[in-house]
Image (spheres, helix red, strand yellow):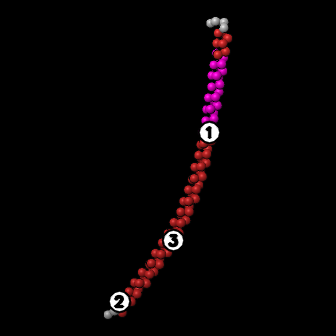
Amino acid sequence: MSPILEPRAAALDAARQHAEQGNKETQQDLIAHAEQLNKETRQELMAHTDRRINETLVLIEDLRHDLQGVAEGVLTINQKLDRYMDQTDQRLMRLERQVP
């Protein structure tokens, strides 16, 4: 190699090595940042999932309460209907006795 080109070649080689080292550091930084973002995203997702589960449990409890109210209402209506049917049967039997 010519004496004129040797310093330039050495400088270019040093620059290439520096760039390669910088690329490795940048790549490591990007990997670390991606891992941190992944961890944070998982934590946020878990927190969001926990909130949604809690909200769902509250809604289920509300539905159970509403369903219990409906069931009690049906039971009350059935009891009233049974009393009405008994009264109607009794009236019908009295009328049948009165008719010759």
As helix, strand or loop, the secondary structure at mark 3 comes to helix
Is residue 29 one of those drawn in magenta?
yes
- The reply to whether callout 2 and callout 3 are in contact (CB within 8 Å) is no
Residue 72 is marked as: 3
Residue carrying label 1: 37
**Predominant secondary structure, magenta span:** helix
- The reply to whether callout 2 and callout 1 are in contact (CB within 8 Å) is no
User: Disc 2 and disc 3: Cα gap in Å?
Assistant: 36 Å
- Determine whether, in the image, residue 74 is placed left or right of residue 33: left
User: Disc 1 and disc 3: Cα gap in Å?
Assistant: 52 Å
What x and y, as percent, mark residue 21?
A: 65, 23
What x and y, as percent, mark residue 63?
A: 53, 63
Foreground label between 2 and 1: 1
Foreground label between 1 and 3: 1
- Amino acid carrying label 2: it is Glu
Residue 4 is marked as: none
Magenta-highlighted residues: 13-39
Foreground residue among 2 and 36 = 2
Residue carrying label 2: 96
- Estimate how packed mark 3 is, as few (under 14), some (14 to 19) or many (20 or more) residues with alpha carbons within 10 Å: few
Quadrant for residue 39, please give it: top right
Residue shown at the point (56%, 59%) measured from the top left? 59
Q: Is residue 46 above or below residue 80?
A: above
- Amino acid carrying label 1: it is Leu
Foreground residue among 20 and 78 = 20
- Amino acid carrying label 3: it is Glu
- Estimate how packed mark 2 is, as few (under 14), some (14 to 19) or many (20 or more) residues with alpha carbons within 10 Å: few
What x and y, as percent, mark residue 26?
A: 64, 28
User: Disc 2 and disc 1: Cα gap in Å?
Assistant: 86 Å
Q: How many marks?
A: 3
Residue shown at the point (45%, 80%) measured from the top left? 83
Residue shown at the point (54%, 59%) measured from the top left? 60
